[in-house]
Image (cartoon, coloured by chain):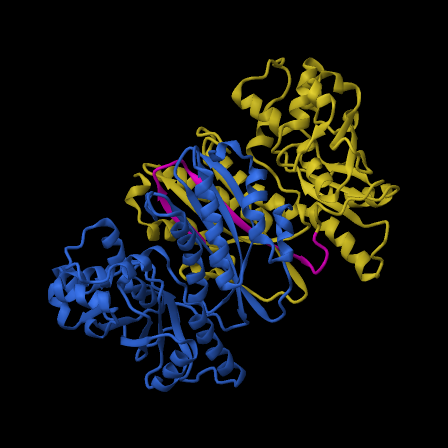
Chain colours: A blue, B yellow
Amino acid sequence: MASDDLSEFDLIARLFEPLSRGHQGALGLLDDAAILPPLNDQERIVTTDCLVCDVHFRREDPPESVASKALGVNLSDLAAMGATPEAYTLALSIPRGCENTWLEAFAGHLQIVQDNYGISLIGGDTVSTPGPMTISITAIGKCAHGSALKRSTAQPGDDIYVSGTIGDAALGLKVLQETLSAATDISLDQLSERYQYPQARTKLGQALSETNTSQINLSNTNNASLIRACCDISDGLIADLAHICTASECQAEIDTDLIPLSASAQELLLQDAPLIETILFGGDDYELIFTTAPDNEALIQKLSLQTQTQITRIGRITQPNDDKKTVILAGSYTDYLSSSEQNGFIHSW
Amino acid sequence: MASDDLSEFDLIARLFEPLSRGHQGALGLLDDAAILPPLNDQERIVTTDCLVCDVHFRREDPPESVASKALGVNLSDLAAMGATPEAYTLALSIPRGCENTWLEAFAGHLQIVQDNYGISLIGGDTVSTPGPMTISITAIGKCAHGSALKRSTAQPGDDIYVSGTIGDAALGLKVLQETLSAATDISLDQLSERYQYPQARTKLGQALSETNTSQINLSNTNNASLIRACCDISDGLIADLAHICTASECQAEIDTDLIPLSASAQELLLQDAPLIETILFGGDDYELIFTTAPDNEALIQKLSLQTQTQITRIGRITQPNDDKKTVILAGSYTDYLSSSEQNGFIHSW
């Protein structure tokens, strides 16, 4: 049965109402809007991201992957602000003829992802479209007043850190597109899984903002232990670091040899050095990139242990330069970049 | 120049960043998410509605009308909950080849509408789509803890009231589609304007929830002066009243002769009585329909004067009936309804 046979009410009742049961303020998705309870002295963090079939995901991607990406990219934005996820709304434009089995699998996997993060669906809209499947999610989180992490607060001298490993998702997309000429003895499933099932760095984001809250409570607003700027890596390592640099009016220098790579990515890079471009400029890793004053290795080590997250220093923030380059690359792999990339990444915002 | 020539960053900077200037927490639309400040003892109300070209608006509708509808339908949902609008996010899927002049006019009118309601754009996403223009807005408002209006709280015996006049928008759509066989001496522009430029009943919604807040503060939780159930009229008068009945497990009886009509709608109905169907079942009026205990005429009169809003009693809530009809129609125009509609509106939720 195609979804045309189901009214909006049937769809909401059968597929999406179960996703709202964990939140009283969702009102069973039966009212005009949802109610979020008062949170004294906490700010609410709000983000909206939209995915379009054939643009942000492939038509052949399984519905479970699409659900994972649609919610994951928003939860990653909340993590980048240091927020604890609370709830989300879903605007789903369903193409004519979409099979109910697809929608059931999509909703079923949303349930799994939302349960992982302890959140519920609180509202939204399901509409029919003559175009491709389009999924817009607004995620809402919370954090202590004044502790949200921003892109604009990096300072020259800061060390730059990233979580996890970089480049896996972009390499995973190449695996799925079958455009890698790699030896078959490399495990590639883990790369495609990074692309299809992104994990938001929620715990790390929370720990970063809580580090700042505890410093603020000690009135140490100039304390060198503050986490300064943060964003998530969705557009690509270099592009997202450039966002921090632009917002903070700084420059960054990173050493490509310091970038943390998975075992599979390392092996691929050994076989095909120009893949460094995919690693640096590909996106969809949903790791966090953040800056903190130098000499905070002990703090970072503590955060890494506390959140069970690999955290790696990859470079530092410098004074802005008149050449308008935002990110300067150094390291042994830079020879394999095209000349414009060797000259650094120019962000013209 | 088509929008393909503008990057997402260019678009955001030039068209949408100006819409965020009224809200510090929008962070210039440059960060991963927006920050809404703590609001002690107030709830936040959240709603998401999605509009698709050729489904929810006509391709030939002016961009100003599309902006007005996209924001208006969400603000109407907030009004139905009694919330004060605070901010919104926008997920805009832009079809390839869309003219920048269209986007400029769209953004320009969003500015006008948001200024009318005192709110700002705080975040969102602009993406390219191979499909039709798709606009998803999430609006966020606030109201005193416990005072949000719901659909589920109507009680048998309640009087049913509506704001403004009913049916104008659906008749206005017929004007635009040129499917009305009306005399040319009737002013029809005002009808099509109701369809193209909806106005949310924000002041009335706020006044309704504030009525309840003042009663709650007096600990009069069983007070007969409470506004009980409320929703906005988007799907149509009968469909939306049926939503209240279903959520409240009640039945409703309305007298079609009591339904408030504009002068243009009255004249059209005199010429063509079957248009009563359009008035009762057409949507897009964005008026409020609400219930309150009987004998509250003085309270309603006060609210009407205070908010400068026409408010009309059209019927009452009754005990649920075994025949599962949710809305029973009476009045002189019911003869012109098809037999299934004469028998009442059956909502099978």
Q: Main secondary structure of the magenta part?
A: strand
Residue A304, position in %: x, y?
A: 38, 79
Q: Residue B82 lies in magenta, yes or no? A: no
Residue A74, position in %: x, y?
A: 44, 57
Residue shown at the point (70%, 16%) measured from the top left:
B273
Residue at the limit of the structure toward the right, as seen here: B295
Residue shown at the point (86%, 43%) measured from the top left:
B296
Q: Is residue B318 visible?
A: yes
Residue shown at the point (43%, 61%) measured from the top left:
A77
From the viewer's perspective, tell me whether residue B127 is left or right of residue B220: left
Vertical comparison of A49 with A302: above or below: above
Residue A286, position in %: x, y?
A: 36, 62
Quadrant of res B156: top right
From the viewer's perspective, tell me whether residue B158 is left or right of residue B124: right
Q: Is residue B289 visible?
A: no
Vertical comparison of B26 with A248: above or below: above
Viewer-proximal residue among B110 and B292 = B292
Q: Residue B143 lies in magenta, yes or no? A: yes
Q: Give the residues drawn in magenta, as a range.
A: B124-148
Vertical comparison of B62 with A306: above or below: above
Residue A244, position in %: x, y?
A: 34, 67
Residue shown at the point (65%, 60%) measured from the top left:
B43
